[in-house]
């Protein structure tokens, strides 16, 4: 059948494109670049020291370097680094071969972090702080007094079950002179991942965007790839509101400036030494009057990309959960999947139910497709006669066939409508499965322990290939007389099975259920039509 053959050709090309796209690192090159941004913080490098404090609530633990008060390590206690591992996921890290840090400080004319490449050495009354049960927040102050007696207190504020951390700078100017400085927040990361942190090396189909991102008054959400930063195509954007971030699959680190009343912040990127990319913001200058106190604030998100929580922390921060160009389908599908999960309690069975819902919605179109196929099949002898009769006049053949379709009230394109609906659903589910942290390490049953990664034993892709073969046999294979075309059609399920070996198990599960429902619908529709 022509429609069915075209379907498999179209689907083959579509999946080929999807795999090619996944194989590439997703990238986005903003046109808002400046030839050279301020290299504000090239001096901030890891220092060998033992001056650290440890801060912990019930979902995150931090290691803070007392030189500057930067966060050099962050462990997400609820999330494991790999499936079946007992170790928490280490999001921020400072080692000899990989640096991923959240830095902050005071720069500018009188800023202590601007002086001779030396960071202020803060002090603390103890080196371990943990949020106690039934406490609403944990405040961790560290202090530094400069040679003129100015007192700087940097305060980390953590709350229960929260991944957003408040950072406060309390500046007490004890001198007779006004002080001028800017607050900065910066995230820096080694561009090339060491093998131990490369989670995508074994599965090219699961690659997602890894790089910088920002939000400003003019752009709700923009990705900015490491490649642009490494080639010194740096950002320099003035904005009153917004945030800056580093993204990877499922997790994000973001600085959100809190005070937007004193002027515009500067968003910048910088290519630091040793293959390190940085994105950050610099506040407008503030003046601390003599014998007075000034408090600067900012927020830092270190954690999973949980949309409902990120939305409350900062406008548009939830957009870091990047569903691609079909976000308008992926987002409602995820909301529906979340509702089903609350009822069912299993993400895998929720995928099964959402597949039934999608097939029920598209059933009228599916029925129209197969009715069209039956009518087209019945017209094949007459079309063959037309081709024989006007074999030397291709234009006349086309005219006669079109006239025949009109006479019999058949739209040959009607069979493609369900295809064009199913493919966007397929792609939106793909992005939803590889981008939603809720589905990371989510089990289904038996050997399927992670719906977001491939089936470790490749059983689901094989079952999917069998359902595709059965569906193909029922539909049209017996009506193909060309032996070459018949071989291609028979081989197509094998090709799809190979492709689906690397796809998320949840997506393959969706396709198995979808094909199974389609087979049942085919049998039902064909039996009804044969009775007419």
Image (spheres, grey):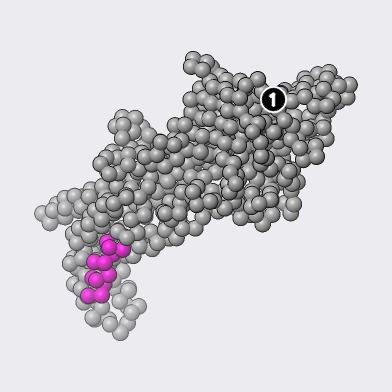
In the orientation shown, which residue stands out farthest toward the bottom? Answer: 392
Taking the image as shown, residue 405 lies to the left or right of residue 93, namely left
Q: Is residue 5 above or below residue 69?
A: below
Q: Residue at x 21, y 63 (%)?
A: 476
Segment tinted magenta in the rendering: 483-495
Q: Secondary structure beneath disc 1?
A: loop
Residue annotated with mark 1: 123
Identify which residue is drawn at 19% across, 50% down: 520
Question: Left or right: where does residue 297 sit relative to residue 90?
Answer: right
Residue farthest along the top direction in this orientation: 134
Q: Which residue is nearer to you in this view: 474 or 202?
A: 202
- Quadrant for the C terminus, please: bottom left
Q: Residues within 10 Å of mark 1 (few under 14, many from 20)?
A: some
Q: Position of residue 95 (x, y in %)?
A: 58, 43
Instruction: Kindly tell me whether residue 257 is visible in this rendering.
Output: no
Tell me the quarter of the picture where residue 488 sits: bottom left
149 left or right of 507 in image:
right
Write the residue at 26% across / 47% down: 513
Up/down of 67 relative to 502, above or below: above
């Amino acid at each position: 059948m022509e429609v069915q053959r075209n379907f498999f050709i179209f689907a083959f090309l579509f999946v080929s494109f999807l795999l090619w796209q996944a194989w590439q690192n997703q990238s986005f090159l903003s046109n808002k670049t400046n030839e050279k941004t301020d290299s504000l913080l090239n001096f901030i490098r890891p220092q060998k020291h033992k001056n650290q404090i440890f801060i912990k609530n019930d979902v995150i633990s931090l290691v803070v370097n007392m030189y500057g008060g930067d966060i050099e390590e962050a462990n997400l206690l609820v999330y494991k680094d790999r499936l079946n591992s007992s170790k928490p996921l280490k999001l921020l890290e400072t080692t000899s071969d990989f640096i991923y840090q959240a830095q902050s400080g005071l720069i500018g004319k009188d800023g202590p972090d601007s002086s001779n490449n030396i960071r202020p050495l803060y002090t603390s009354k103890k080196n371990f702080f943990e949020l106690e049960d039934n406490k609403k927040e944990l405040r961790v102050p560290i202090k530094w007094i400069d040679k003129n007696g100015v007192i700087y207190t940097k305060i980390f504020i953590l709350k229960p079950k929260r991944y957003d951390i408040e950072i406060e700078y309390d500046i007490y100017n004890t001198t007779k002179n006004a002080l001028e400085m800017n607050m900065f927040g910066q995230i820096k990361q080694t561009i090339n991942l060491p093998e131990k942190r490369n989670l995508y090396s074994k599965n090219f189909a699961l690659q997602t965007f890894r790089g910088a991102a920002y939000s400003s008054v003019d752009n709700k959400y923009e990705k900015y790839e490491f490649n642009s930063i490494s080639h010194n195509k740096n950002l320099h954007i003035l904005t009153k509101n917004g945030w800056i971030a580093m993204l990877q699959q499922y997790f994000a680190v973001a600085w959100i400036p809190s005070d937007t009343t004193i002027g515009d912040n500067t968003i910048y990127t910088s290519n630091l030494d040793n293959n390190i990319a940085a994105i950050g913001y610099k506040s407008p200058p503030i003046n601390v009057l003599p014998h007075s106190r000034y408090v600067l604030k900012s927020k830092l998100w270190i954690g999973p990309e949980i949309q409902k929580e990120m939305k409350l922390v900062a406008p548009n921060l939830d957009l870091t959960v990047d569903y691609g160009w079909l976000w308008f389908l992926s987002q409602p599908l995820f909301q529906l999947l979340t509702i089903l999960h609350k009822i069912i309690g299993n993400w895998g069975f929720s995928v099964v139910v959402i597949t039934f819902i999608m097939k029920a919605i598209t059933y009228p179109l599916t029925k129209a497709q197969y009715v069209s196929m039956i009518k087209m099949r019945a017209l094949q002898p007459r079309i063959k006669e037309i081709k024989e009769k006007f074999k030397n006049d291709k234009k006349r053949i086309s005219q006669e066939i079109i006239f025949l379709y009109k006479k019999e009230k058949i739209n040959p394109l009607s069979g493609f409508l369900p295809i064009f609906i199913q493919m966007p659903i397929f792609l939106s589910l793909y992005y939803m499965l590889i981008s939603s942290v809720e589905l990371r390490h989510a089990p289904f049953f038996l050997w399927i322990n992670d719906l977001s990664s491939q089936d470790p034993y490749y059983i689901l892709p094989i079952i999917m290939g069998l359902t595709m073969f059965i569906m193909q046999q029922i539909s049209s294979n017996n009506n193909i007389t060309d032996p070459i075309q018949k071989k291609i059609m028979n081989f197509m399920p094998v090709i799809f099975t190979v492709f689906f070996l690397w796809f998320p198990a949840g997506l393959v599960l969706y396709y198995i259920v979808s094909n199974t429902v389609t087979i049942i619908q085919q049998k039902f529709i064909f039996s009804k039509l044969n009775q007419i």
